[in-house]
Amino acid sequence: MTKGRKLRLDATCLQTTIHHPTDSGLLVDSVRVLSRMVQRARPLIQAPVKNIQQLCRSRMRTARCTAQTLHRQLRRKGEDKEAEQKKLYQKLVETTEQMVQQARKVVRVLSKETQQSAQLLARQAKQVLPLVERVITQTRKRMLENKKVPAGEKVLSLFEPHTRAIPRHKGGALVEFGRQVMLDEVEGGIVTRYEILEHPEEHGQAIDAVVHHREVFARPPHLVTGDRGVHSADTEERLRAAGVKRIAIPAMGKVSEERQALERTRGFRRGYRFRAGIEGRIASLRRDYGWSKCRYHGQDGMERWLGLGVLASNLRHIAQKQSA
């Protein structure tokens, strides 16, 4: 099928199954999740607790009404618009904080119960509460204090907390919500590696790709190609030190005349043309093998979802080659 002489790499975004994240939407989600938990906890609490009805009260109606008023306020015009929005955000944040206080008290009560279901609910609440507190903090900074929150610190979903905002730099949607995935493919159409990137940047991924390629084929590829996104300052030096003979990765930014002449040579252009095939592979994975949106939950689920798509694609490709 392949001897692993050529290696091409590119990245794509695998979207997670979430609604479009907004500060008010995340706060309402937080209140809904915690309200559901405290209401589920009420029949599990056996020990006598003072004001249990107030402790297990849902604040979902208050949060929903405040969010609806806020959305109507966004469409209004007037000088006092921004001040009114801040008041509504403040009210929504306070409602969420009250719900957090209730949930923490309920967790303390549940931790003393011996039932397995009570212990399980307490563990689930302990996992959600830190995310809710981060949502409250980022909303205070963004909407009440007019400060920026670093992209890596933002919570975009309570249910898929590993989600990141991925800039597209193309037509259509400006941002996708999911994770950036790096893909390696050798000649013969076989995908040899995929990796979920912690950050959207692709710089330096060619080095990791060659290291993995050597582990699989026991030798470096003869040719490595990719787009400008995988180029970094020392990419070519490190690839040549690793044993790669031909490198067809365009440099980023303004380049020298010498570099321009190199990228116009016949060998470079031929190597770079080989790169185009991986875009077709990514399109096939997105269209036929579920790589457009992940249906599994969590980052572990995303790893499985990606792996199943690659495995199915490779098996089908091998079968088609053998039957030809």
Image (tube, rainbow, N blue to C red):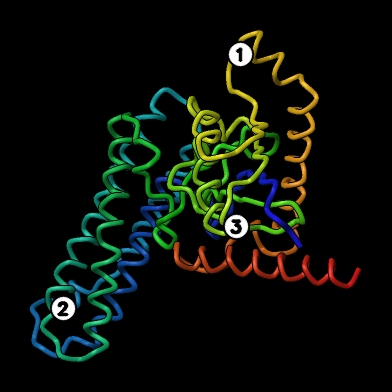
Left or right: 107 in relation to 294: left
Instruction: Specify the amino acid type for callout 2.
Output: Ile
The residue drawn where x is 28% and y is 47% is 91
The mark that comes first in sequence, 2 or 1, is 2
Q: Which mark is residue 52?
A: 2
Dot 3 corresponds to which residue? 217
Provide residue 111's location: percent of width, then percent of height. Answer: 14, 79
| Front disc: 2 or 1 | 1
- Residue visible at 65% across and 26% down? 250
In this view, the residue in front, 254 or 141, is 254
Question: Which residue position is annotated with label 1?
Answer: 255
Query: In the orientation shown, which residue stands out farthest toward the top?
Result: 257
Q: Is residue 77 visible?
A: no
Quarter of the image where the N terminus is located: bottom right
Q: Residues within 10 Å of mark 2 (few under 14, many from 20)?
A: few
Q: Are marks 3 and 2 in contact (CB under 8 Å)?
A: no
Specify the amino acid type for callout 3: Phe
Identify the mark nearer the N-term, 3 or 2: 2
Q: Tell me where residue 273 appears, x and y as whole percent.
A: 78, 35
Q: Is residue 87 above or below residue 156?
A: above
Residue at point 43%, 44% (across, down): 70
Distance, label 1 to label 3, CA atoms, is 34 Å
